[in-house]
Image: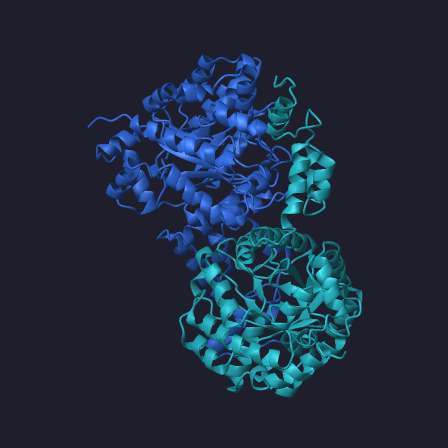
Chain colours: A blue, B cyan
Amino acid sequence: MTYTTQLDAAKQGIVTPEMLVVAEKESLSPQILCQLVAQGAVVIPANKNHRSLSPYGIGQGLRTKINVNLGISRDCMDIEQELCKVQTAIDMKAEAIMDLSNYGKTRQFREQLIAMSPAMIGSVPMYDAVGYLEKGLKDITEDEFLAVIRRHAEDGVDFITVHAGFTLDIAQKVKEHQRLTHIVSRGGSLLFAWMMTNQRENPFYTRFDEVLDICAQYDVTLSLGDACRPGSINDASDGIQISELITLGQLTKRAWEKNVQVMIEGPGHMAIDEIEANVVLEKRLCHGAPFYILGPLVTDVALGYDHITSAIGGALAASKGADFLCYVTPAEHLRLPNLEDMKEGIIAAKIAAHAGDIAKKIPTARQWDNEMSQARAALDWEKMFQLAIDDGEKARRYRKESTPEHEDSCTMCGRMCAMRTVKKILSDEEVDLL
Amino acid sequence: MTYTTQLDAAKQGIVTPEMLVVAEKESLSPQILCQLVAQGAVVIPANKNHRSLSPYGIGQGLRTKINVNLGISRDCMDIEQELCKVQTAIDMKAEAIMDLSNYGKTRQFREQLIAMSPAMIGSVPMYDAVGYLEKGLKDITEDEFLAVIRRHAEDGVDFITVHAGFTLDIAQKVKEHQRLTHIVSRGGSLLFAWMMTNQRENPFYTRFDEVLDICAQYDVTLSLGDACRPGSINDASDGIQISELITLGQLTKRAWEKNVQVMIEGPGHMAIDEIEANVVLEKRLCHGAPFYILGPLVTDVALGYDHITSAIGGALAASKGADFLCYVTPAEHLRLPNLEDMKEGIIAAKIAAHAGDIAKKIPTARQWDNEMSQARAALDWEKMFQLAIDDGEKARRYRKESTPEHEDSCTMCGRMCAMRTVKKILSDEEVDLL
């Protein structure tokens, strides 16, 4: 049995060792999983060179996964500090980490990250090209862009964001169109600048076949980036965004022909009432490829609280079929997130993913909630802490700061605790409120 | 022109001074508002004795409002501290404050609260009965319960929660039924204990007409409580919950006949995929009366983060037509919220309400977002801070803690800021990434 990628194997009906691990994690039959991979509805990002990986699946019928962004940059070149973030992300069970490094010793950081990480590793080669090559953006050649992709693939990156669907034609529309926030994708803006300055077509589009060849060789999953994702609810679901999505759908089919796994990146900022339509459209236009979203942030005004706006949008999107959520921290739009911001972002994303999983009927999802509610009804505080989404770190602290009169209640309601009152009545005890 | 309540006036086609204020706040025609009040789709909680009130409307076609809970209790008898919370809630533009005081000098606190507050004031007389009367719950008489309601009405409370729909028959079902978390409504649990211990019907149900007479006299809006609101996603939308809702619908009609304004309280804990159905059912079964919800919390496991789980559920519910959101703080299920918890809860609720308003097409809702996005595209930081949901308190602090190399960007992307890059290209400037 020989195969190049997970998709190649699946098409041949081969259940790979990675599929077995994923099937086990998802309580799913390996054969069903194999079929889902074959049809492109599930990806298993697993670069052949990422030896510490514990593979995860992303897509239809699976638990919603979350991604954590980090990396070194001009404003934060401290590799040790970023590796500390990596360890925290792993400890908090983030399934994926995207290395957005764009300045400094990016390769050294990437190598250490991949070596230590059981989580899937993603990257945006475009960022690294700009930071690593240390030359003016407009002077970077097509060959150089491809060389950076190859290097990331060799290093063991499991999935890469490539904005291959952002064509010169669409870029021209951005320039003419009256969007409020034009382009807010960082990679997209760099490509926009490159294309506009050089008046040339997107090199990832023109040389897409070469990108695919590299991906196929190492089994790098393509995460097709949405350069035109809306950066304001005003710009959401407009012709520009959907045009790019249509192109991404065409590229998806080309990738699948070459046995390259694909997921599609999505918004962004978007009003609640447009989210379901966007999930439906992505699944239709991109032929069922998994949907990887950044947000959606359901309002633009919550500066400092975008972990909440994105949890709202992410939960709703996941409930409608989005498969993979990129975390957003309270520092979004403001500064590089610190460790605390990162933790808050991870927890908010985990809440959104889990709430989505309950709604999309992932078979095992409700079990966790039911255990928590049983512990609650029993007023079993230690059990509640153990089951809490952050392993009870915050809950323990809160309870310690505010000791109740009665061990079985909390200071919120004290003796008037509904759980306590009802428990007493149901076991024929007297209720002692005074 | 004479009338007793806002509803009475509206039925006669009289536009009251309160309606004029609300119409102005909502950019709505006073005549249309008057019709909505007449049909019960909008309430204007405005007790005749609440002289410092700046009235708000709650209901169909209006902005989603938020409520802040506070009050003195056995675990926190410090009136000054609670009044400090009141001032913060008012400063943060919460439209309503519920006084959940249940121990100590509750009347003194209530009087000070009402005197200083332009926000609508709500209360749960049941709590006060238990705390204030200082006698065993089972010994409280029906007359005493009604006397407490009358006292709250006299004092100027604008809306009161009364669990009049929680009949002995439903309480019996709770006892027999296999719910995970039985009853989590505090007032509901007290009533449950009273009914079960005394084996008597709910006094607020049997003497509902007298409750209505008191409400009509002072124009107190009835907030019909859902004693059986689910306390776990497992218990949501079950027969018990919906049975009580059907009864609340019957009581709503009786209240309207006596010109008493009504809103209906709702869940609770609830999976995302059940929220829309619950809003539809409430509007149908309760004949279009405004829906006032606590949550819904879309998962049970986020102990310490229920301001986020409720923001998800609240935003979705508001987008489908819920009218009034009770805030939930990070301290929910854990302890009495402190000032910081309260602020986080208010901000999360405001995000949910606003995100809901955008989706339910409140005409002016998007304007705020568009102004923010214009400021973002212009990299106008001061303007962004001014427009932020917390008036920029957190955003200013974050930016100060992490000074960017360039004034026009932030440390998140530094020179690679998409806004900055695109702005330069669109104005034909060179992009300086190095």
User: How many numbered marks have been drawn onto this rendered protein structure?
Assistant: 0
Q: Residue A377: image x %, image y %? A: 48, 66
User: Which of the 4 image quarters holds residue B265?
Assistant: bottom right
User: Which of the 4 image quarters holds residue A176?
Assistant: top right
Q: Is residue A390 left or right of residue A151?
A: right
| Residue A75 visible within the image | no
Quadrant of the frame with the C terminus of chain B: top right
Residue drawn at 61 percent across, 31 percent down: B412
**In the rendered view, would you say A230 is above or below B109?**
above
Q: Is residue A135 left or right of residue B377?
A: left
Out of B378 and B52, give the one closest to the viewer. Answer: B378
Residue drawn at 46 percent across, 17 percent down: A145
Quadrant of the frame with the N terminus of chain B: bottom right
**In the rendered view, would you say B294 is above or below B371?**
below
Q: Residue B137: image x %, image y %? A: 60, 81
Out of B45 and A148, give the one closest to the viewer. Answer: B45
Out of B58 and A150, give the one closest to the viewer. Answer: B58
Q: Residue B28: image x %, image y %? A: 68, 59
Out of A218 and A322, give the one closest to the viewer. Answer: A322
Residue drawn at 53 percent across, 14 percent down: A133
Q: Is residue A42 left or right of residue B8?
A: left
Q: Residue B64: image x %, image y %? A: 62, 58
**In the rendered view, would you say A260 is above or below A378?**
above
